[in-house]
Each structure stands twice: as C-alpha cells, then as structure tokens.
Image: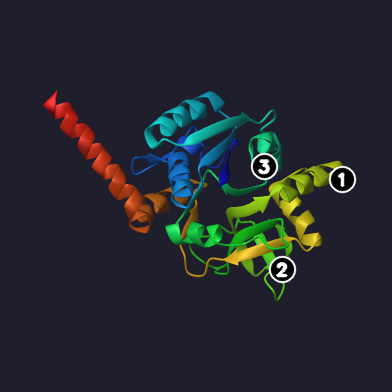
Amino acid sequence: MDALILAAGYGSRLRPIEPCKPLTHVNGISLLEISIRQLMSVGASKIVVATGYRAQEVENSLSDISKRHSVEIITRRVPDYSKPNGHSILAAADALSDQFFLVMADHIFAHDTLRQLAGTQLGGNDAVLAIDRRVDSDLVDPDDATWVRTDATGQIVAIGKDIDRYDAVDCGAFMVNSGLIDAIKSSVAQGKAGSLSDGMQELADRGKAGTCDIGSSWWLDVDEAQSLHLAKQQVPSQLPELFQENALFDDALQTMASAS
C-alpha cells in the first residue's frame, strides 16, 4: 500500500518555537519519522512526502530515515506551498497508486487508530476519513479543528473549519483513491481554493465520502506550543513500541561509542 504525507506547509503556529514543523522532535523522534514509522506498521511499503517550506532540510532527513528503516520514500515538491493543502496532493499524484493512505505530518495516532483505518474498505466511496466523535476533548483545538457533519449511515454531509453544525472532528488520516484527486481538481476548476476539505466536500456532495469512527482511540494534532507539550507528555505511553525501539537504538549507539 502507498501512503502520502503532507509536509509542505509553513507551520506558522509552531514556528515561534520550532523552525520546521515536520522536523520537530517529540522525545527524540521527529514528527515526520513518527508518521513514517506508524504508516509502515500498518502496511505502507512506499511513502510519498509532499515537501515545500524548507524542502531541502526535510528531504535530507527523509533520505536518512529511508536508509535507517529500509523503506522506499519518494518526495514531490509543491510548486506553491502557500496554496491550500489540496495542491500538495495534486503535486504528488503521479507517484501514487490508485488507493493510498493520506496523513498530515503533524498528526500522531495511537496504533489502533491507523490499524482500524487500514482495515476499512472503501466500498462505493472514494475516501474514508478517520473521525472522532469526542468534539469537546481537551486534545482537540477548536480554533484549528476541521469539523465534520455526518448522516445516520456515517457518510459525510459537510466538512470544513467553519461549518455551523457538526458531530465529529477530522482526525487527519484518510484512506482514499484517485477519486479524491479528481475532486480536488474539480474544486479548483470551480474557482475554489483547492483545499483537501474542498475535495472532500465535493466527494460528500456525490455521496462518496465515508468515515471511520475511531471510538476511544488516541490521536493528536501537533500544531502549536501547547499541543507539542501534550505530545511530549503523552506520546511515549500511547506509542510504547515506537519509543521503546528508539531507546534500544540509542542504547546500542552509546554502547558502540563506548567500545570504540
């Protein structure tokens, strides 16, 4: 399975304390590496990363991650990364198979969250979005959240940051096919900005945008100082295998250094 990570944006809300959001470290591991290792754990074998702001630094890091974890990583630079995130998807489209995971570089998920999404069938949908019904959770930033309104069957009716009624929040993880790419192109042709939400709304209007309710599973959007603080507090316990593996790797390096 292919996967696409969106890592092109400016990261403006986090930039006062971290110059490059995808390379921001949480207890010794960058957000970008966390995304890659999580996707690998649910079957992603080729990972495409859309880069833009500080692209060379991000791409240098990806080269190192690819070697250390023996995973194929392909980069696609977004020509104008000041545009909404749907343009990152369009920039990476040529490198993707028909069906793929889609995540944001600044979102972290408990393993169960992505595993549940990975086991979801698209059926008649072109996209299935992981959603959280806990709209009042302390882990959700209401000033930045993308909200979702669903019907009785769980299909998306409306999605966006400014919709007036909602019953879930967008977790930033999707299983999609090329229909989403076509929907983003269509939204741009209609004069819309070309955000991922524009494309998802287009699919929702066609009845082709489903959801995967994550229930009580943990996730976090690391978008500013407070959420980064929460990540450093909570991620080691929420992703114990990943951080235990990293600690063992660090111990091995220290042992090798001592021996030399």
User: The residue under label 1 is which amino acid type?
Assistant: Gln
**Which badge, 3 or 2, comes first in the chain's sequence?**
3
Q: Nearer the viewer, residue 169 or 94?
A: 94
Q: Which of 252 and 80 is in front in this view?
A: 252
Q: Is residue 52 visible?
A: no
Label 2 secondary element: loop
The residue that disc 3 covers is 85
Tell me which residue sits at (68%, 56%) in the image. 127
Label 1 secondary element: loop
The residue mark sitting in front, 1 or 2, is 1
Real-space Cα distance between discs 1 and 2? 24 Å
- Residue 189, position as x, y percentages in the image: 86, 42
Q: How crowded is mark 1: few (under 14 residues within 10 Å), some or many (20 or more)?
A: few
The residue that disc 1 covers is 190
**The C terminus lies in which quarter of the figure?**
top left
User: The residue under label 3 is which amino acid type?
Assistant: Asn
Q: How crowded is mark 2: few (under 14 residues within 10 Å), some or many (20 or more)?
A: few
- Residue 37, position as x, y percentages in the image: 43, 45
The quarter of the displayed image where residue 255 is located: top left
The residue mark sitting in front, 3 or 2, is 3
- Residue 33, position as x, y percentages in the image: 44, 40
Contact? badges 1 and 2 (CB < 8 Å): no
User: The residue under label 2 is which amino acid type?
Assistant: Arg
Q: Nearer the viewer, residue 48 or 158?
A: 48
The residue that disc 2 covers is 165
- Residue 172, position as x, y percentages in the image: 58, 53
